[in-house]
C-alpha cells in the first residue's frame, strides 16, 4: 500500500524541506511561496509597498540619467559626471549606492569605450567618438533601484553605433522574456542568441541581480544561458537585466584598481540596464526609460 506521506519525509513541493516544515498543515502552498523562494533560493519577493518604494527610487535614477545625458559632451571629465550624479542624488533626498560600496570610491560608475563596467570617475576626458556608460544606483527610503545607459560622445563611429544598438536590443529582448513560468535561463538565452547572431559576445563574469532591499540580492541573472534552465520566474521578483556586450571577444581583464573591468582584446563594450518586476502577466520596469526611442545627446 502506498503509505501516507510521513512528517519527516521530503516535501513533494520540491522545497528540499521536510514535509512537516513545509506544506503539511498548509491550505495553499501559493500563500507561502514567499517563504519557499526565500528558503530555496534566498530570494526576497517584494510586496505592493516595496514595489512602490523601489519605483519611486527608480524615478530618481532615470531622472538623473536623463539629466546626465544632456551634460555629455567632448572635453568633459568623467569626474564631472560623478560630481553631478552625487550632488543631484542628494538633492533628491536619495543616497548614491556605489559610494563606499565594497570600497568603491565614487558615486557612479562611468565606463568609456573598452571599459565594460565599474569604471571609476577621474581625470579621463571624453573625446569625440567615445561611448560612455553611466550606471546609477540610488537608495531612497531604504529601497534600491539600478539602471544604466550608454551614450555617444559627439559623432559615433560605425563600430560604436553597432555595439550600442546591439546591446540596447539585447536589453529589450531580455526584458521581453520576463513573465511568470519563464526561467532565468530564458532571459539569458534571448540575450545571448541575439548578441552572437550579430557577431558580438556576452560577458560572463558580471550578471544581473536581484535588487530592492539591497544593492545586490539573489537571484543572479546571467546574460547567457539555455531555454528552460534556472529558477522559474514568479510575480514579486525584482531584478536587473544589464547585458554587457563586446564587439570582439567575451574575455575580460580587471585593472590594478580592482574595479575597472575592460575587454581583454581592447574592443568596444556597451551596456544598458533596467530594474524589472515580474508581474502576474509579464513585467513592469521600475526604471522605465524608453528602450524604443532611446534619445542620444547631440
Ligand atoms: N551598478 C552596478 C550594477 O549594475 C554595480 C556597481 S558596484 C560599484 O550592478 F561598487 F561599482 F558601484
Ligand atoms: Co546592476
Ligand atoms: Co547598475
Image (cartoon, rainbow, N blue to C red):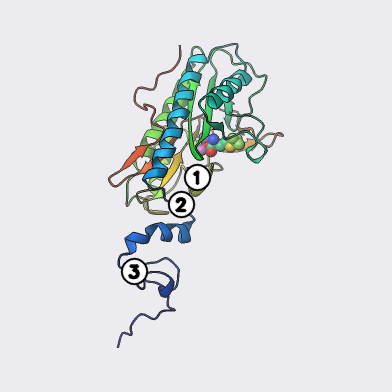
Taking the spot 37% from the left edge, 38% from the top edge, the residue there is: 175
Circles 1 and 3: CB atoms closer than 8 Å: no
**Residue 286, percent from left and from top:** 40, 36
Q: Residue at x 33, y 41 (%)?
A: 283
**Front tag of 3 and 2:** 3
Q: Earlier in the sequence, mark 1 or mark 2?
A: 2
Secondary structure beneath label 2 = loop
Residue depicted at 49% across the width and 37% down the height: 141
Q: Secondary structure at mark 3?
A: loop
Name of the residue lying farthest toward the left: 281
Q: Residue 213, which numbered label?
A: 1
Q: CA distance from mark 3 to mark 2?
A: 21 Å
Where is residue 80? Give x, y as percent.
61, 18
Q: Label 2 belongs to which residue?
A: 44
Q: Quadrant of residue 289?
A: top left
Residue density around tag 1, few if under 14, some if 14–19, many if 20 or more, within 10 Å: some
Residue that carries the numbered disc 3 in the rendered image = 26
Cα distance in 3D space between marks 1 and 2: 8 Å
Give the mark, 1 or 3, whose residue is nearer the N terminus.
3
Amino acid at each position: 500500500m502506498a503509505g501516507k506521506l510521513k512528517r519527516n519525509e521530503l516535501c513533494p513541493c520540491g522545497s528540499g524541506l521536510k514535509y512537516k516544515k513545509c506544506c503539511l498543515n498548509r491550505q495553499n502552498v501559493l500563500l507561502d511561496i514567499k517563504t519557499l523562494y526565500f528558503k530555496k533560493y534566498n530570494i526576497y519577493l517584494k510586496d505592493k509597498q516595496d514595489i512602490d518604494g523601489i519605483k519611486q527610487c527608480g524615478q530618481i535614477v532615470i531622472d538623473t540619467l536623463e539629466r546626465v545625458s544632456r551634460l555629455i559632451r567632448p572635453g568633459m571629465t568623467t569626474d564631472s559626471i560623478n560630481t553631478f550624479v552625487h550632488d543631484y542624488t542628494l538633492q533628491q533626498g536619495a543616497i548614491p549606492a556605489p559610494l563606499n560600496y565594497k570600497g568603491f570610491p565614487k558615486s557612479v560608475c562611468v565606463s568609456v569605450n573598452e571599459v565594460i563596467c565599474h569604471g571609476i570617475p577621474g581625470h579621463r576626458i571624453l573625446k569625440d567618438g567615445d561611448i560612455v556608460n553611466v550606471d546609477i544606483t540610488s537608495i531612497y527610503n531604504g529601497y534600491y533601484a539600478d539602471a544604466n545607459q550608454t551614450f555617444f560622445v559627439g559623432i559615433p563611429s560605425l563600430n560604436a553605433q553597432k555595439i550600442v544598438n546591439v546591446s540596447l536590443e539585447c536589453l529589450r529582448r531580455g526584458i521581453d522574456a520576463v513573465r511568470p513560468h519563464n526561467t532565468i535561463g530564458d532571459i539569458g538565452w534571448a540575450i545571448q542568441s541575439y548578441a552572437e547572431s550579430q557577431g558580438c559576445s556576452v560577458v560572463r563574469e558580471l550578471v544581473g541581480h536581484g535588487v530592492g532591499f539591497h544593492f545586490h540580492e539573489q537571484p543572479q541573472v546571467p546574460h547567457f544561458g539555455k531555454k528552460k534552465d534556472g529558477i522559474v520566474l514568479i510575480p514579486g521578483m525584482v531584478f536587473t537585466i544589464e547585458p554587457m556586450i563586446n564587439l570582439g571577444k567575451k574575455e575580460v581583464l580587471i585593472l590594478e584598481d580592482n574595479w575597472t573591468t575592460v575587454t581583454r582584446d581592447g574592443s568596444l563594450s556597451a551596456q544598458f540596464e533596467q530594474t524589472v518586476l515580474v508581474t502576474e502577466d509579464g513585467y513592469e520596469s521600475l526604471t522605465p526609460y524608453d528602450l524604443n526611442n532611446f534619445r542620444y545627446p547631440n
